[in-house]
């Protein structure tokens, strides 16, 4: 486990006085992002489906809090937006995956993936951005994926949601720019990251393709990467931290790719 203290950059706390909400913060990218923003001085609210790991993660972090919410339920999303209070930095990270051919892809799975990864970010932005407009400062960072830019088979809901998330990012960035102030809306698009979500996907990919699990990482997940390595969650977290800086204002509307050369082909 990488603690917040190991993520601190030069001992600086440029986000002191800012309040960040990170969804999907119990593990993987969300956990790394929440810890990193805390190390940069932000007061962070961790949100995830299960409250148990959140209590452990927030223990000992200055000002950190936790709110459990099922983001597939719009009522719980709206409640999260009310309960979290003022938010300066919103990181829409929560996600899930389901791998199946389109002809056998369950409608219930489609609805849940789209609800968590597209509708919930929309609802949170809709609720939280007015206060950012009032204060003249805000950062909205949507953790998308390289699959927001290109597609892979058997992931129709995930790819559709991530493409939609980039459309949401661009649209809100234009609206925020027209309101003035220092408010940026960006997306981060990594290729495969070493997370529990990816580890679970290895089993599904092996089943559908009829190959051994040991072959999935090299021959499926990293097939298109120029650099044959999984990205570490802390590397994505540092990218998110950069996008929170005042100096990153000009990147509004952009999709930052961390794809190990996938799109360079």
Image (cartoon, grey):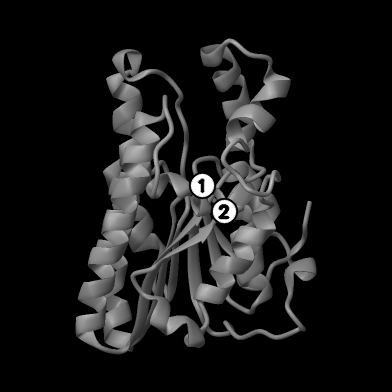
Given the current orientation, which residue lies at the most extreme front position?
Answer: 265
- Front residue of 150 and 89: 150
Q: Nearer the viewer, residue 74 or 93?
A: 93
Front-lying residue, 130 or 163: 163
Q: Quadrant of residue 249?
A: bottom left
**Residue drawn at 56 percent across, 21 percent down:** 205
Vertical order, 214 against 238 (above or below): above
Residue 34 spot, x, y in % from top left: 60, 62
Q: Is residue 33 above or below residue 104?
A: below
**In percent of the image, x 39 and y 49: which residue is there?**
149
Residue that numbered label 1 is attached to: 48
Q: Looking at the image, do the residues carrying marks 1 and 2 touch, with CB atoms under 8 Å apart?
A: yes
Q: Residue 30: which disc? A: 2
**Label 1 vs label 2, nearer the camera:** 2
Residue at (46% x, 24% y) in the render: 99
Residue drawn at the location 27% of the way across and 82% of the way down: 133
Classify 10 Å Cα crowding around label 1: few (below 14), some (14-19), many (20 and above).
many
Horizontal placement of 245 versus 133: left or right?
right
Residue 108 against residue 254 in the figure, above or below: above
List x then y, in percent, for residue 166. 33, 56
The local secondary structure at tag 2 comes to helix
């Amino acid at each position: 486990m990488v603690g917040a203290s190991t993520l601190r950059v030069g001992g600086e706390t440029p986000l002191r006085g800012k309040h960040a909400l990170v969804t999907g913060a119990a593990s993987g990218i969300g956990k790394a992002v929440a810890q990193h923003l805390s190390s940069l001085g932000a007061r962070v609210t961790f949100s995830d489906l299960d409250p148990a790991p959140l209590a452990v993660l927030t223990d000992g972090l200055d000002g950190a809090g936790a709110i459990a919410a099922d983001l597939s339920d719009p009522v719980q999303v709206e409640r999260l937006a009310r309960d979290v209070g003022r938010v300066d930095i919103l990181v829409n990270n929560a996600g899930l995956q389901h791998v199946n051919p389109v002809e056998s892809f369950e409608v219930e799975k489609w609805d849940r993936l789209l609800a968590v990864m597209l509708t919930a970010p929309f609802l949170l932005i809709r609720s939280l951005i007015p206060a950012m407009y009032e204060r003249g400062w805000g950062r909205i960072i949507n953790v998308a994926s390289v699959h927001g830019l290109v597609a892979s088979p058997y992931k129709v809901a995930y790819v559709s949601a991530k493409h939609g998330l980039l459309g949401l990012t661009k649209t809100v960035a234009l609206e925020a720019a027209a309101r003035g102030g220092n408010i940026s809306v960006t997306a981060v698009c990594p290729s495969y990251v070493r997370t529990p979500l990816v580890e679970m996907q290895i089993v599904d990919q092996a089943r559908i393709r009829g190959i051994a699990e040991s072959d999935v990482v090299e021959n499926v997940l990293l097939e298109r990467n120029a650099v044959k390595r999984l990205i570490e969650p802390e590397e994505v977290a540092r990218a998110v931290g950069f996008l929170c800086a005042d100096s990153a204002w000009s990147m509004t509307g952009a999709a930052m790719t961390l794809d190990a050369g996938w799109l360079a082909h």
